[in-house]
Image: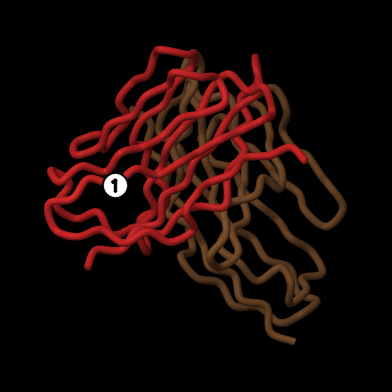
């Protein structure tokens, strides 16, 4: 069963806590992306990676960090420096040599 | 950088009517324009896309048109059905870049 999986579906963060969102794909896609979605704001790019061990900042990278140690995995850490982390987080990936991005089901992060 | 504006923000139609959503982009070098449908609590799904060497593309009840001179593209849905109710996003990708810039979305409501 191929696709993009994100876990958990819901995540709760306490003040001052770092949390990590998982994104895994078994589609053999090279590029992976993280977006943040807020009501009425569309999708905003946080980080992206076109190849293992390399990644670039998107438009709103402050307060977030990523790693790309394996082709299949692109975890996103929301650090305590992100003061307004409540949002719906979406991971996407693209096949080699293609522009199309395919999205996972998302993780909703809530602050306690 | 690229800027994408999407209108309207909400659109209500009766079942069987047509719906049109319009987007404008700022970067004349953009060459790839996908449309996504997002149902509540889920990740966006690609429904149709168009490249700058094509003026129109159809897939059953869905069509997209592109006017490169005016830098705008539109999504047309004919014979709307209640299951078409969702949020629709347009996006644009400048030539030479691997990232997409998204519009802020249109909530389409189809009443039976």
Indicate the position of residue B63 as horizontal and vertical percent values: 76, 49
Residue A104 vertical position relative to residue B82 in the rendered view, above or below: above
Kindly indicate the quadrant of the structure image that contains residue A54.
Answer: top left
Q: On what subunit does the disc labeled 1 rest?
A: A
Kindly indicate the quadrant of the structure image that contains residue B87.
Answer: bottom right
| B9 sits to left or right of B11 | left
| Residue pictured at 75% horizontal, 87% vertical | B112
Residue B72 vertical position relative to residue A15 in the rendered view, above or below: above
Indicate the position of residue A38 as horizontal and vertical percent values: 35, 58
| Local SS, label 1 | strand
Question: 10 Å neighbourhood of mark 1: few (<14), some, or many (≥20)?
Answer: some
| Residue pictured at 36% horizontal, 30% vertical | A47
From the image, tell me which residue sits under label 1. Answer: A19
| Residue pictured at 37% horizontal, 19% vertical | A55
Indicate the position of residue B24 as horizontal and vertical percent values: 48, 43
Report which colour depicts chain B: brown
Front residue (pair A73, B9): A73
Front residue (pair B102, B26): B102
| A12 sits to left or right of A21 | left
Indicate the position of residue A46 as horizontal and vertical percent values: 33, 36
Question: What colour-coding does the image apply?
Answer: by chain
| Residue pictured at 75% horizontal, 74% vertical | B17
Residue A30 vertical position relative to residue A41 in the rendered view, above or below: above
Front residue (pair A68, B69): A68
Front residue (pair B107, A32): A32
In this view, the residue farthest toward the right is B60
Q: Which chain is red?
A: A
């Amino acid at each position: 069963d191929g696709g993009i999986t994100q876990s958990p579906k819901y995540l709760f963060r306490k003040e001052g806590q770092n949390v990590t969102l998982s994104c895994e794909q078994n589609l053999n896609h090279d590029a992976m992306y993280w977006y943040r979605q807020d009501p009425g704001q569309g999708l905003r790019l946080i980080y992206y990676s076109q190849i293992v061990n390399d990644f670039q900042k998107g438009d709103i990278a402050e307060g977030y960090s990523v790693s790309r140690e394996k082709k299949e995995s692109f975890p996103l850490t929301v650090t305590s420096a992100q003061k307004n982390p409540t949002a719906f987080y979406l991971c996407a990936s693209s096949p080699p040599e293609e522009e199309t991005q395919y999205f996972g089901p998302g993780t909703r992060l809530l602050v306690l | 950088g690229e800027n994408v504006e999407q209108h309207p923000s909400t659109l209500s139609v009766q079942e069987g009517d047509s719906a049109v959503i319009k987007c404008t982009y700022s970067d004349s070098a953009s060459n790839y324009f996908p449309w996504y449908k997002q149902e509540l609590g889920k990740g966006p799904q690609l429904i149709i896309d168009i490249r700058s060497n094509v003026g129109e593309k159809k897939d059953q009840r869905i069509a997209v048109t592109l006017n490169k001179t005016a830098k705008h593209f539109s999504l047309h849905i004919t014979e709307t059905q209640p299951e078409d109710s969702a949020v629709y996003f347009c996006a644009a990708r400048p030539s030479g870049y691997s990232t997409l810039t998204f519009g802020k979305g249109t909530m389409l409501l189809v009443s039976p």
